[in-house]
Amino acid sequence: NAGVTQTPKFQVLKTGQSMTLQCAQDMNHEYMSWYRQDPGMGLRLIHYSVGAGITDQGEVPNGYNVSRSTTEDFPLRLLSAAPSQTSVYFCASRQGQGNSPLHFGNGTRLTVT
Amino acid sequence: AQKVTQAQTEISVVEKEDVTLDCVYETRDTTYYLFWYKQPPSGELVFLIRRNSFDEQNEISGRYSWNFQKSTSSFNFTITASQVVDSAVYFCALLNTNAGKSTFGDGTTLTVKP
């Protein structure tokens, strides 16, 4: 059981480049989300999805796009990378109902130069 | 709007000391859930415990205990007889049941020195 898988683990981009961070889960979880973690700022929600075909913005959505075509996958797209997007990104999923906890991927460390 | 405050940015203790991590939350929901997650130096995020808003029973699990007080909107976490392996960043989180979103505090970095 792989859980939540994120790729890549590390990425360096130049300002203006685009890329997609991949996230896949094999637990049939309805809810998926992307967080970014910056020093001293905890985990901030970027986008989330409560099921296939449904996405919504979180606290810091600007500069990021998401889609949810399947239950398993929830990719995060950076359209035009900026140095302010240098961060560690975590994908997380959980069962849609009740008080189930989040299951996190191992993170992607992104540096934008 | 929801908010989670972890006022302690960093805590340093010597092994075998007891340590309490504070968490204060704000929400307008009458039903909500609170969580603690641990992030060790390796970087992964691991779920530790959850508590429902209607269940104020405190819980003890080995060296860990949690004190949930609805009257003060607090959900504090105590480690008894701390060990070096407890060194990590600890996050408190609040789950909004309507939207399904979790709001995290800024985290408390705990360092346990041998």
Image (cartoon, rainbow, N blue to C red):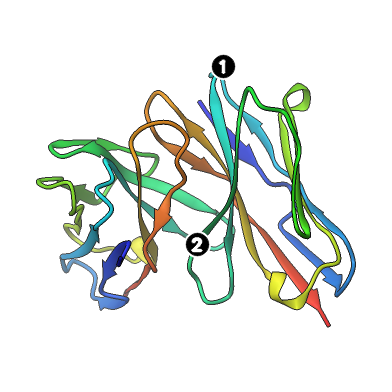
Q: Which residue is mark 1?
A: B30
Q: Which image quadrant for residue B28?
A: top right
Q: Quadrant of the N terminus of chain A?
A: bottom left
Tell me the quarter of the picture where residue A82 sits: bottom left
Q: Residue A96, relative to residue A36: is it above or below?
A: above
Q: Quadrant of residue B69?
A: top right
**Callout 1: chain:** B
Query: What is the x, y in percent for residue A105?
Result: 36, 63
Give the mark count.
2
Query: Which residue of the protein is positioned furthest toward the bottom in this rendering?
Result: B114
Percent from the top left, x then y, of residue B27?
A: 57, 24
Residue occupying the point 68% across, 46% down: B6
Q: Nearer the viewer, residue A14 or B59?
A: B59
Which badge, 1 or 2, comes first in the chain's sequence? 1
Q: Disc 2: which chain?
A: B
Q: Residue at left 88%, top 61%?
A: B18
| 10 Å crowding of disc 2: few (<14), some (14-19), many (20+) | many
